Image (cartoon, helix red, strand yellow):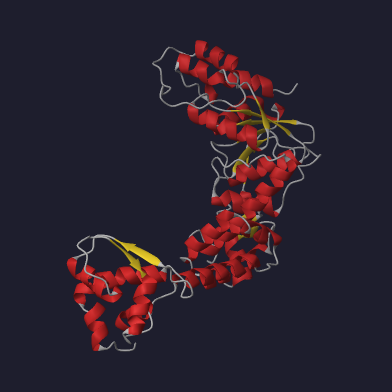
Amino acid sequence: MIHPDARLERLLGGPALAALRQRLRRHFERRSAEDPGQHLSLSQLAAAEREALALLAGRPVSTARSARIDIARIDAALRSAGVCDSLRQALERLDGPIIDRVAERQAHQQSWSAVIQQPRRDTRLHAWLQTPAAAALLKRLTRRNAAQADTLLAQADAVLRHLPTQGLARAQLAAQALGNAHALDASQPVASLVLAAWRHSENSALQAESAGAQAPTTGERVRDIWARAGVLVNELARPALALNLPPTAAGPLAPGEPCYLSLRQLLRAPPAWAVAGRAIHVCENPNLLAIAADRLGARCAPLVCTDGMPAAAQRTLLDQLTQAGAHLHYHGDFDWPGLQIANFVLRRWPAQPWRMRAEDYQTAAHQAPHRPRDLSASDTTTADWDPQLAPAMHRHGLAIAEEAVADRLIDDLRLD
């Protein structure tokens, strides 16, 4: 920094004018050096500040607390006095270089544009990077550091080139693609980028197939998205429960006995489900499947249980059955969470409601033992498939568990 001479110190230096200098510096920071602007309006000026501005411009001191400064006039006065070439130069001599925020912003934007537009090998990553959400997520994950963003994108690109896979553990994928078994853990930013790009690709494909429809997101979890990419996360947790599903034309595994199918099994060795054109019934509660096994055994129609909101294993199984040509029919609890699950299932695959209409609920409510109302009047969920169902549930105020209507459901499941 060039040390100012005594005249400049007297004109604009010292602690008393530090706040004024900061205000003047901010003006120049917001303008390019080539275009410093012609005028600057200042308010709430102290007496010492008004005096300094008057001396700089060669004008009488004003008593007004606001002033409109002619920058060109001050520049000319400083040059004429031989103090310095401009007000900007005077401020830099007193307090150091003024950062060109305009140039800084332009350079920042150019660096980010280069990161976003850099060709990537994986087209899914490139497509996601063209969305506004991509830049926002990248800047948040990297605290606006373009160089770090470029590194993360290179890592995400390396991972996506391995996807989809078939039953590969997430830790193994991370080790193979990035050399670190924990690089794709839930807390890692590269995992967020991979999942965002994969999800965008899924949505784009669905929109192309369904004329702009949006993929459902209710109950969506990271584990479920990884599973659709063929990646195993906690692959033994919450296995899917099924009864009499025919994996091949030879018949079902363990006829008449409930069986669990882990995400690991479903992804590593997908069964060849022999269900084309067949009705597959789906229930919400494991108890119903157990009742069906007890009463009907091998004479029960194929039945799958979601065990509440479907998790990764259940979603993978229902995906496989739908892709194999099955027609899903869903039943769940008559309560508000039950309707939320039913809405999701019927939209996601899609499925047909199975004894889940308003008349089915009203029949069950009339036959239910007398008890106090137990459906919250303040909560509500509209049934997508029947607009009369939620009003009927409000009128009766009774939650009807799936097990309470087991007799009717078992009759539907009975094979002749």
Classify residue 348 by image quadrant. top right
* Residue that protrudes farthest toward the right in the picture: 249
* Residue 233 can be seen in this image: no
Q: Nearer the viewer, residue 50 or 412?
A: 50
Q: Residue at x 55, y 17 (%)?
A: 361
106 is higher (above) or lower (below) than 308: below
* Residue 41 can be seen in this image: yes
270 is higher (above) or lower (below) than 214: below
Question: Where's the N terminus, which quadrant?
Answer: bottom left
Q: Left of 64 or right of it: where is 146?
A: right
Classify residue 49 by image quadrant. bottom left
Q: Residue at x 54, y 24 (%)?
A: 403
Q: Position of residue 14 (x, y in %)?
A: 21, 78
Q: Position of residue 358 (x, y in %)?
A: 58, 17
Q: Left of 256 or right of it: where is 105?
A: left
Question: Where's the C terminus, which quadrant?
Answer: top right
Q: Left of 92 or right of it: where is 66?
A: left
93 is higher (above) or lower (below) than 150: below
Q: Position of residue 332 (x, y in %)?
A: 57, 28
Q: Position of residue 250 (x, y in %)?
A: 80, 39
Give the mark count: 0
Q: Residue at x 53, y 32 (%)?
A: 340
Q: Left of 64 or right of it: where is 184?
A: right
137 is higher (above) or lower (below) than 375: below
Classify residue 178 by image quadrant. bottom right
